[in-house]
Image: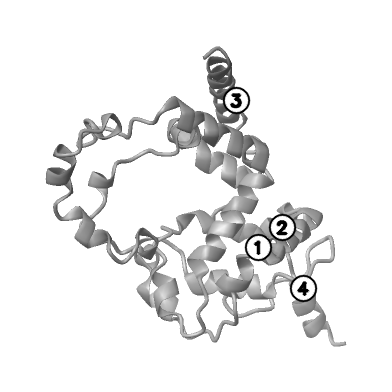
């Protein structure tokens, strides 16, 4: 092995002997790679690949760049859905490839799923981002803590009541297909129709959030507790989970006392 090749190889290894940076467009500094915990990264990769949604979201990247061309985040920040799929594709052999992406890169995604619509291989980069964000929260990564901290109030309201916004805040023509194909038709006359519905929970939703019945909030709390959601979020936002549990216990006491 000549000296020039040895120096080049050494530049692709950090002090722990991890190999990284061998893929075009996926290189980053050794300092960032060293900051990752290899055991943690391997666990996250295993969690990702064992998730039932992974088989639907990931197939095989042909590196066409269609997803990036449609990505609104790419226009404003340093984010490419193609890179997400590429890193996931190689993460099994080099789990540290996920580290920098989960540290900061990942959180630039708008979750609009435009990438999903145009991928000829039927990959869902936005879905993969969602899985990785869940893993970041579940494993208490610092990036998740930093991201959730400014939205503690919103997170509490979503976890405690199941909602944060009203349908009136949605755009008329929804770009998000999880809203359903008939959403645009449904909202055309929604204000007029709501005024004719004498249901207490619909009252005043033109300018404020849903009024959620206490029984519904109690059921939501029980689901979150029994399904492990509270334990998962606790690693990244303990204060919020403590408040949710306190509110849930009050609801349980109220239910017992009739």
Which numbered dot is residue 98?
Answer: 1
Q: Point out the tag, 2 or 1, that comes first from the N-terminus.
A: 2
Marks 1 and 2: in contact by CB < 8 Å? yes
Pick the front one: 71 or 219: 219
Above or below residue 133? Residue 221 is above
Where residue 60 appears, as percent x and y from the top left, is 60, 82
Report, in whole angstroms, how far the alpha carbon at label 2 lies from the one at label 4: 13 Å
Instruction: Name the residue beneath numbered marker 2.
Output: 44
Marks 2 and 3: in contact by CB < 8 Å? no
Q: Foreground mark, 2 or 1?
A: 2
Q: Point out the tag, 3 or 2, that comes first from the N-terminus.
A: 2
Q: Residues within 10 Å of mark 3 (few under 14, many from 20)?
A: some
Q: Residues within 10 Å of mark 1 (few under 14, many from 20)?
A: many
Q: Foreground mark, 2 or 4?
A: 2
Report, in whole angstroms, how far the alpha carbon at label 2 lies from the one at label 1: 9 Å
Specify the quadrant of the image occupied by residue 112: bottom left
> Which residue is outermost to the right?
1
Which numbered dot is residue 202?
Answer: none
Where residue 178 appears, as percent x and y from the top left, is 40, 61
Q: Foreground mark, 3 or 2?
A: 3
Mark 1 lies on a secondary structure that is helix
Which numbered dot is residue 93?
Answer: 4
Q: Residues within 10 Å of mark 4 (few under 14, many from 20)?
A: few
Instruction: Name the residue beneath numbered marker 3.
Output: 245
Report, in whole angstroms, how far the alpha carbon at label 3 lies from the one at label 2: 27 Å
Above or below residue 130? Residue 231 is above
Q: How many marks?
A: 4
Mark 2 lies on a secondary structure that is helix
Where residue 134 appears, as percent x and y from the top left, is 60, 51
Report, in whole angstroms, how far the alpha carbon at label 1 lies from the one at label 3: 32 Å
Report, in whole angstroms, how far the alpha carbon at label 3 lies from the one at label 4: 40 Å
């Amino acid at each position: 092995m000549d000296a020039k090749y040895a120096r080049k190889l050494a530049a692709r290894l950090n002090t722990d002997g991890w190999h990284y940076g061998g893929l075009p467009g996926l290189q980053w500094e050794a300092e960032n790679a060293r900051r990752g915990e290899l055991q943690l990264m391997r666990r996250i990769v295993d969690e990702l690949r064992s998730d039932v949604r992974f088989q639907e979201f990931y197939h095989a990247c042909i590196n066409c760049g269609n997803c990036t061309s449609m990505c609104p985040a790419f226009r404003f920040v340093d984010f490419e859905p193609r890179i997400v799929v590429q890193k996931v594709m190689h993460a099994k052999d080099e789990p540290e490839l996920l580290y920098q992406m989960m540290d900061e890169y990942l959180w630039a995604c708008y979750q609009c799923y435009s990438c999903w619509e145009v991928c000829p291989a039927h990959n869902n980069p936005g879905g993969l981002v969602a899985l990785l964000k869940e893993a970041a929260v579940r494993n208490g990564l610092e990036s998740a803590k930093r991201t959730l901290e400014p939205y503690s109030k919103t997170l509490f309201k979503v976890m405690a009541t199941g909602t944060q916004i009203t349908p009136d805040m949605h755009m008329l023509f929804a770009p998000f297909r999880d809203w359903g194909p008939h959403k645009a038709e449904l909202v055309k006359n929604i204000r007029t129709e709501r005024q004719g519905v004498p249901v207490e929970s619909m009252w005043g939703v033109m300018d404020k959030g849903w009024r959620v019945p206490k029984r519904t909030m109690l059921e939501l709390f029980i689901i979150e507790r029994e399904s492990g959601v509270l334990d998962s979020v606790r690693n990244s936002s303990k204060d919020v989970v403590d408040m949710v549990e306190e509110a849930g216990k009050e609801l349980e006491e109220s239910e017992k006392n009739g």
